[in-house]
Image (cartoon, grey):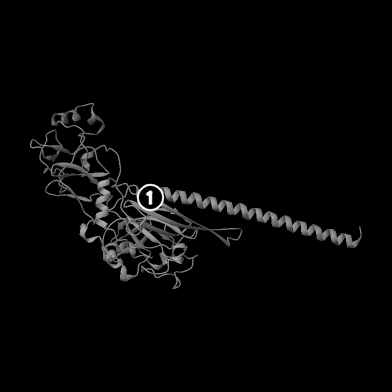
Amino acid sequence: MTLVETVIATALLGTALVMVTEGLTGVRRYANLGDTQDDLRVGALRIQREVGQDLCLSCWYFPDGATTYPATTLVADRALRYWPYVTQMQLPTTYQNGNFRHIEGRSSSLVTLPDCPAFGSSLPTDISLTPSQSGWTTSYYARSQELVFLRQTNGTWVADPANYTRSSLRFPTDPTEVAKWTVPNNHNVIGVKYASAWTRDAGGNFVLHSDTNTLVSATVDADADGNPDPYGVSLAGGVLKVDNGTLSVQVQFDSVDGTSYTMDSDQNQVLDATKVRDFQYAVVPSNVGLGRLVRAYKERSTSAPAFTAYPLAGDWISWNSANGGWGMKVDKVLSEDVTRVVFETYRQATDLAIDQVRLRLFMARKFGDTRESVLGQTISTVFTMRGRNSVTDMQTDATTLGTTRIPISY
């Protein structure tokens, strides 16, 4: 073989090796892309499942009188107290709702995502009804519209229901049947006594049991906690209410101290709106991915808590001394690949029913050998709140809110 032939053969071999190497690199990049796509899809399904489980236990709650809620301006709406409540990441002070200071008081370090562009002047104004919608709706980096909501409690029978101050359902209809629940080898042997705290007295009025076999008035307070002593199987998801002789079940929300309800003179349990426990979906910085989606809950601290740059379960994301030391504390991390969430309710969107909540999820993940590429994915899902989903409930809630929609950002 001549020198020329050797040079040509070497050049051809080198070219072939380069082509093979490029082909293998391309295959690896394609496989990496496919894995990243799969990871984002699986992550999105996980988020949808978690959010769906929460929102099916939620519903509208208006604590301040129905006449105040048909607001016609964003400023008026932001001053109201209701749930579910859509809030924007770190609202300007001018629009900050004093009822939700413990949520809206997040510092800028827990709003801006380190690997994403800062919120700049090129984006639409945060609080406005008229900016251009085109860039806002598709942006992965604009401010999130986060959701603040309540959850209905749920649970099962308890061994000693006398320790609970909640109402409960009663199965026997004849007062003489009550004794059957305390006969040995019946329900009493497994720690379940009466089926309920409620029964009717001789006059047909609803009263509560005391911790005896005798039906007595609802004023018995053996544990001196200020409430009549209920007795029986805990109805964790609801509260019984008497209205003109009719017994109905009201929503029992999770509370900050387990005692959301107080008893009025008619033995109705009245919800204390200051004690319901807020839950929030929030996007915070992540040291694993581009953005961390967390669920946080309302908690109180007598002193300012320490904040971390990348909050995990048990870390605080907001706290406000002006609101009595209440703040939001993370209890669950849902994803490390979320850069923005946009929640909407019937209050914001004309195409949603009264009991529906829409989530637009913006997910992004770096991939490749040097992590120089970013794959994005957007998902829109509509969930149904089922805490109050009878026709009457939905009609009442729709009447309370009115027909005027009040978008937050556009």
Q: Residue at x 23, y 51 (%)?
A: 260
The x, y position of residue 92, in whole percent, is 34, 70
Q: Is residue 123 above or below residue 203?
A: below
Q: Residue at x 81, y 61 (%)?
A: 11
* In front of the other: 240 or 162: 240
Q: Which residue lies under the disc numbered 1? A: 383
* In front of the other: 346 or 309: 346
Q: Is residue 117 left or right of residue 267?
A: right
User: Which part of the image, by quadrant, shows the C terminus?
Assistant: bottom left
Q: Residues within 10 Å of mark 1 (few under 14, many from 20)?
A: some
- Rendered image quadrant of residue 380: bottom left
Can I make out residue 32 in this image?
yes
The x, y position of residue 48, in whole percent, is 43, 50
Total numbered circles: 1
- Rendered image quadrant of residue 26: bottom right
* In front of the other: 205 or 21: 205
User: Which part of the image, by quadrant, shows the N terminus?
Assistant: bottom right
Q: Is residue 68 left or right of residue 146?
A: left
* In front of the other: 70 or 344: 70
Numbered disc 1: secondary structure: strand
The x, y position of residue 128, in whole percent, is 36, 69
Q: Can you name the residue that lies furthest to the bottom here? A: 121
Q: Can you name the residue that lies furthest to the right here? A: 2
The x, y position of residue 187, in whole percent, is 23, 30
Can I make out residue 304 in this image?
no
Q: Is residue 263 left or right of residue 24?
A: left
